[in-house]
Amino acid sequence: MSTDTPTEETASFHADPYERKWIMFSLVLLAAFAVTVAVAGFALGFQVPGDETRVDPRTVADAPPWSQPGLRDLGNGEYEVYMLAQQYLFQPREIRVPAGSTVTFYVTSVDVQHGFKLQDTNINMQIVPGHVSKLTAEFDTPGEYPYICHEYCGVAHAAMFGSLIVEAGGDS
Amino acid sequence: MTTLQPQPTYQLTGQEKRFIGLHLVVAIFALAVGSIFGPLQAFEWSGLDLYQYLEPIGLDDYYKGLTAHGVLNALVWTTFFITGFLTLTTIVGLKRPLRYPALNRAGFWLMVVGLVMAAVPILAGWASVLYTFYPPLEASWAFYLGLTFVVVGSWIEGYGFFFTYLAWRKENPDTRTPFITFGGLITMALWQIATLGIAVEILTMLLPFAFGLTSGTDPELGRTFFWFTGHPLVYFWLLPAYISWYGMLPKQAGGKLFSDSLARLAFWLFLLLSVPVGFHHQFVDPGIPTGWKYIHAALTYGVAFPSLLTLFTVVASLEYAAHRRGGSGLFGWIRALPWNDPSVSAQLLAGILFMFGGIGGITNASYDVNLVVHNTAWIPGHFHLTVATAVTLSFMGISYWLVPHLTGKPLWKPRWALIQTWLWFVGMIIFSNAMHVLGLLGAPRRTELGTAPYVPDEWNGHLLRVSIGGAILLVSVTMYVVTMIRTAAQKERVAAGGEVEIPVAESLRDPQLTPLWLDSWRPWIIGTVLLILLAYGPQLVEQISNASLSSPGFGP
């Protein structure tokens, strides 16, 4: 190297003043995002699925509650749905609840990975054999909400869906 | 090599040029084949199923095509282009030949063997498991083993770069690592650390299972291993484009790298932060506590920071270049950039679309916001802006000087190349925007939507736009491949003295003034390992100790 090479002593971290402002702006922006999603998730209830029970995919469909997949009425407008996913259908294929219901979905798979996305809601879950995926949503607006498999599960994956029907005039 | 004289630029030998060129031949071949399948999927979405006409050649299956598209374009085109390009940045930056050329050759040919081994089962329909190959969907053992060989081959090429660097470092103890080499070495180090996840998944779970040694897998643990690799994989794709944006594009535009310090800091932060973020691909998975998911979300915002640094430094370098070319004005300088150079145009357009890709990426990382887009068409919409544009269009741009340099032949019809870059830009805007909108409307990704019974009418216009965008991209990629073939195959050679140079940008400030901690491996490697242990360690211990290989395999 040439002899007029600067020495270690003169080396320093160099950032342009504009660059420093950009760095501050970037850090504040990202911190604001991190706080916002944390508040939404942990305080306001926009929560993602967590760690639920494990099951054995080979035998899960043999014993309750999974041997009888479907809707359970817990009273007070609360429901739970136990649902099995398999190539290429959901059991149950159709669910009916009155408007104003709160529904908790428990979904597992008896074969490969599937997805469970309930359209027009925040219910979006990966369905993994060996685990139970759980999320809750409230349904105030009557109508038909398709739930579709959104994880590739084999050749007829595109045919895998079901319907949640929210009926008007619930006896709430 | 203890000379005190400034060294002249290194001229690649014929053998080195052929070796780098071989990487490009495989890469461009993979891109050419893989890109045929992309538009077939895009057309199917608007009801034009061309797959049925491919039955005579055994390619009539949408998901076989989708697997081929993902593996060839996202894994093969990128990995071969990158290992070839990093061979160049290692040799040219350090101004010395590879320390062990035979080692690098061995790595390359192992990658080729792996590619063939994986390609056969894909095309035969024994591996229609897509490029995520989530268990317990089962593929032929040859598919898993082939992928393993591709990864191990790329590791070996990486070792070759590291040995070359160590030899150079011995001869140049006090010199800052030249930037393009520095970036390449970090890219390879990141790759070696990141691919440990997928290596463990394949070697401990998928191969024993495919060989029939075990009766099942643990699919959730498999996902955790996969995404340990899966996210840093995108930085393995992206960083070589960044090397060009920071270290080459400023030269092509007539300027210099704005800040050597910030550029190096960005690369170290990518090494530090790109692995411990994998759970952001598993936000909606069961079996992982929400607290750990949130920690990975926060770290993902962290890895967005070096990309924001990159935005500033690259734009500042370009603005400096534009001012030297007589450009002025708050945004008016942009017009003064050499837009007529297809290599520059490709990379500028890639950078513009990458800004939108980055914004979408932050959306995906946003923990609960991800509920809206997870596994929807939004996701491929996003990564067609990142890997398929920021990376792929930049690589196309690089090859517009690289192939003429390697072959000693002029670029065939530069005007066509220029049009090609704009077609990619326009096609991708149409395609990607439609995909993002479809995702927000709830359309699932990688699904044969032309046959799906639940598609509402409101999706139809967007599905048509996906097809139109795909058609434009098909024209663009064809023009690229033809340009590459015609450039290499022509008889005409460049006139003596008119050889296409390798653009290596100087830094505005002497790199020797960059502090030593930005050119020291030890603290950053230690930090990277510690952060991975903190962010992944407890969950890996938990998931591995609770592992249950109870999930039997199923065909797709």
Image (cartoon, coloured by chain):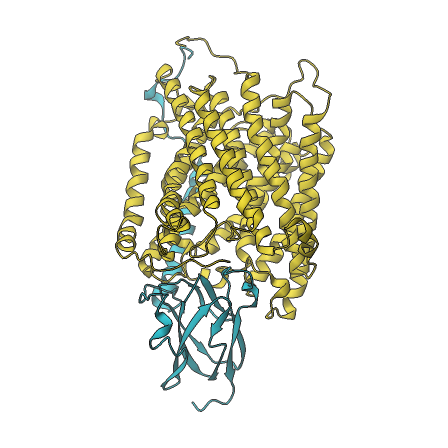
Residue B352 percent location from the top left of the image? 59, 44
Total numbered badges shown on the rendered structure: 0
Residue at 45% across, 46% down: B141
* Residue B493 to residue A82: above or below: above
Q: Residue B407 vs residue B517: left or right?
A: right
Residue A119 percent location from the top left of the image? 52, 70
* Residue B129 to residue B77: above or below: below
Q: Is residue B262 visible?
A: no
Say which quadrant the N terminus of chain B sits in: top left
Residue at 54% across, 52% down: B382
* Residue B199 to residue B445: above or below: above
Residue B529 percent location from the top left of the image? 30, 40
Q: Residue B28 vs residue B286: left or right?
A: right
Q: Between B467 and B552, which is closer to the camera in this rendering?
A: B552
Q: Between A99 and B352, which is closer to the camera in this rendering?
A: A99
Residue at far front of view: B212
The picture quadrant where one finds residue A5 is top left
Residue at 46% across, 67% down: A86
Q: Between B76 and A35, which is closer to the camera in this rendering?
A: B76
Q: Is residue B182 visible?
A: yes
> What is the display colour for chain B?
yellow
The picture quadrant where one finds residue B491 is top right
The picture quadrant where one finds residue B411 is top right
Residue B415 percent location from the top left of the image? 73, 33
Q: Between B511 and B32, which is closer to the camera in this rendering?
A: B32
> What is the display colour for chain A?
cyan
